[in-house]
Image: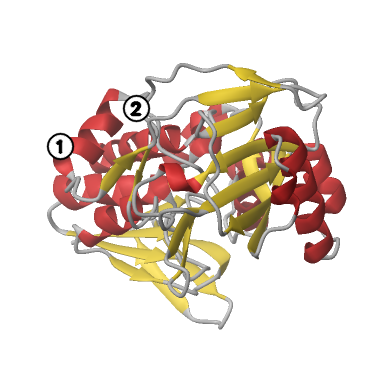
Amino acid sequence: MTTIGIVGAGAAAAAATHVLDGAVPDADITVLEKSGGLCGRAATRRNDDRGLVYDYGANYLKADDERVVDLVTETLDDEGMVDATEPIYVFDESGEVSPGRDADEHKWSYRRGLTQIAKRLFGGTDATVHRRTRVETVRRDGDSWSVVDADGDSWGPFDALLLNPPAPQTADLVADAAWESPVREELRAAAAAVPYRTVWTAVLHYPFELDRPYYGLVNTDKAHAVGWISREECKAGHVPDGESLLVVQAGGEWSAEHYDRDPADNVAELAGHAAEIVGDDRLADPDWTDHQGWRYAMPEQGAERGPIDAAADHDLYCLGDWVAGEARLHAALANGLDIGEQVADAR
């Protein structure tokens, strides 16, 4: 039997698990996730009292990788998949909105949100997923790996260990790893060198319908306090008819400066910005809100490949959008497929 441990239950980990479950028939796969959710920053919340579903991290899945398209439309059950067909417009530092990106791009989610991708991928395997299990220590024991969680419980031994946290958190795990190899420091340095954009998100609900020709607005010059605004009502099943729900994601500089400020103040300020950009004063006064900060939201560049490949020679694999070098959901899924195949080939 082949034992495989995976730290983190993000999109890349879900894709890798899907591959390994099929390619390594005797694989015993254990996934350890620190939070209560799946799919990492492709996160979904629900407000059942209001009938709301909203993707508050990654906004949608693009059809930019043929393997990923086949995965979600052919391999997985596509029941409940929705496509926001309205285009994405742009705005600049002054807040002026203009038509921008191609209206024909797929912008996929599900009626129950983007987390359906990971739920369906993990759910189609025999892997065991343990949520609310924070891994704090990684150990190399002879030819195998093991990990210790925050409660002091040990997991393993594993023939291969996959690390799916964001690069800074992977760097911390590797830095403290009980692993006597020069590759450890090389891998730590490579992961630690990946710069990240912080994103602070406000979710704003309104009891009226917003009439606009676009699904989303993106700030192209990165000079505005707001980086992105999207309308969840453009996704079928996410917002009741006659209502609006905006996901407002602040730019990196604003998010870093305001990350630890009172959330109510952040929400109010972002609602004011949304009202100005969209051109509707009513948006400054939402009737219900939610928020989330993502300290390690989006890698600005990929990691150096040499140390990652060297670690793989020791059955330690890193995966995720920071390994792919593109901060997009489809890139994380594609990287997970690649790593799953790489691990399977090495077995």
Between 232 and 149, the one nearer to me in the picture: 232
Residue 122, how many percent across, how many down?
28, 58
Q: Which mark is residue 236?
A: none
Q: Which mark is residue 63?
A: 2
Residue 111, how many percent across, how many down?
32, 53
The N terminus lies in which quarter of the figure?
bottom left
Number of numbered discs overlaid on the protein picture: 2
Q: Quadrant of residue 68?
A: top left
Q: Left or right of 256: which side holds 328?
A: left
Q: Residues within 10 Å of mark 2 (few under 14, many from 20)?
A: some
Q: CA distance from mark 1 to mark 2?
A: 13 Å
Between 343 and 84, the one nearer to me in the picture: 84
Q: What type is the residue that disc 1 sits on?
A: Glu
Earlier along the polypeptide chain: callout 1 or callout 2? 2
Q: Residue at x 37, y 67 (%)?
A: 157
The residue to which callout 1 is attached is 74
Mark 2 lies on a secondary structure that is: loop
Residue 50, how many percent across, how many down?
47, 69
Q: Residue at x 26, y 52 (%)?
A: 121
Residue 101, how many percent across, how many down?
52, 18
Q: Quadrant of residue 89?
A: top right
Between 66 and 91, the one nearer to me in the picture: 91
Q: Residue at x 82, y 38 (%)?
A: 253
Q: Residue at x 46, y 75 (%)?
A: 49
The C terminus lies in which quarter of the figure?
top left
Q: What type is the residue that disc 2 sits on?
A: Ala
Mark 1 lies on a secondary structure that is: helix
Answer yes or no: do the residues labelled 1 and 2 have beta carbons within 8 Å?
no
Residue 193 appearing in the image: no
Q: Residues within 10 Å of mark 1 (few under 14, many from 20)?
A: few
Residue 52 appearing in the image: yes
